[in-house]
Amino acid sequence: AKLASKQLRQLGQRVSVWWNLSPMQRAEAFEYVRHRLRVAGNSGRSLFSDGALREVHRRSMGVPRVMNILCDRSLLTAYAAGAREVRGLHVRRAAAELGPGRPHGVAKKARRFLLHPGWFAAAGAVAILFGVWQLLGGMAGVAGTPPSVAGAPPSVAGAPPSVVGAPPSLSSPLPAVSSPPPGALEPRHSEPLILRDDAPNGIDTLLQDVDPSAADRGAARALLASWTLASAAPVETLPELFETLEAHGLHVRRIEGDLATLRRLNLPAVVRLAGPDGAPRSAVLRHLSEGTATLIGLGNATVVRLPEGELTARLTGEAWVAWRDFVSLPPVLRGGHAGTSVYWLQTTLAELGFYGVRPSGRYDGRTRSAVQAFQVSRGLAPDGEVGPATKISLYDALGDYRFPRLHSSARG
């Protein structure tokens, strides 16, 4: 409101990016805490149980600063108790210490933080600093370069954190990185090339005109852009693309199947298309909508839209998708497993309507049956085990996780 006032109109005109910082959703809060622990040096062992993370999110109301304080105190509380993992009990004790005499003291602090005038003053200061920075030419050196949202975090000196050793600090602020609107960083073309059913030779001509190595380079750039990622060095080949994706914490899965298989996974895919000369070309299948497929990164035609039937006729059956394991599950969850990962699975299946009993944290017969029912609903092989394809489908069905999709998900 202050920047919109008449007195500050010249400054307001220099602010080119506006972003609303809202409290984190539960899934975002979980990943935020895990990311802060990784930055602090934690190499894989979970220091917070899922129950503890739920308590942190509930009591902080998703406000990052309050989450930092509460996690810091919870680590100290667990350390004092000689525990090897922060549990919900430790978070509740920490919250009681931060809000004496008030069981929900932290939550009340969070409300005051959200409504306090200082929050709006801070937001105004950020906007003013951004405007001054741009005015002084701060954007000149990075114009046109997409930010790396999921890039490798800066290393933090010090020993890996341990609850039974010195607890890591989560209170120091990290640079704020906001996700751009969907498609904001994808390659753009002023006029998309639209291939119709009555022009069957259009895709053949396009494939003939692009060199296979150039097609690989274009597909690599397109898939990185779909995930709003950047590479320090040019990515020339598909193996280099896969290495870059894995360096950013993503997994790469090779797919053998038709368009229906890719539709079920609901992820942008590097697909191999059979060229008229017999040599395959690479492109990124970015969207599926109402019988129309959208390809990006195919030679000079940055965006190509064609009927699904035309695309299907040229698919070689070889494709690759990138995906993120947001909650760091074991490679395969199956019968006999137990622990927080199984508890998360049971809670998720219950939220999706496939698990009707109280989560136990043990992968029993009911859990297997629920997994099979979910797999059938998503067109997957009902083997009752949670491997990569089932994980991808779970994250997609929840709708709480932000990642590029081929089409609208059931809940997202």
Image: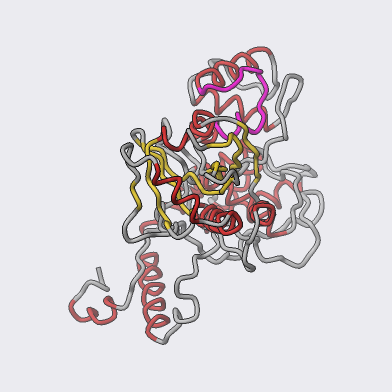
Please, which residue is most extreme toward the left here?
Answer: 6
Residue 387 position, x and y percent, is 67, 30
Task: Determine if residue 149 is in view.
Answer: yes
Q: Position of residue 45 (x, y in %)?
A: 76, 44
Which quarter of the figure has residue 156? Answer: bottom right
- Magenta: main secondary structure equals loop
Q: Residue at x 81, y 61 (%)?
A: 159
**Residue 236 percent coordinates (x, y):** 63, 61
In the displayed structure, does residue 340 sit left or right of residue 272?
right
Quadrant showing the C terminus: top left
Residue drawn 69% across and 16% down? Answer: 364
Q: Position of residue 137 (x, y in %)?
A: 42, 85
Q: Which region of the structure is painted magenta?
A: 378-393
Compared across the picture, whether 15 is left or right of 263 comes to left
Of 92 and 37, the residue lying toward us: 37
The residue closer to the viewer here, 376 or 340, is 376
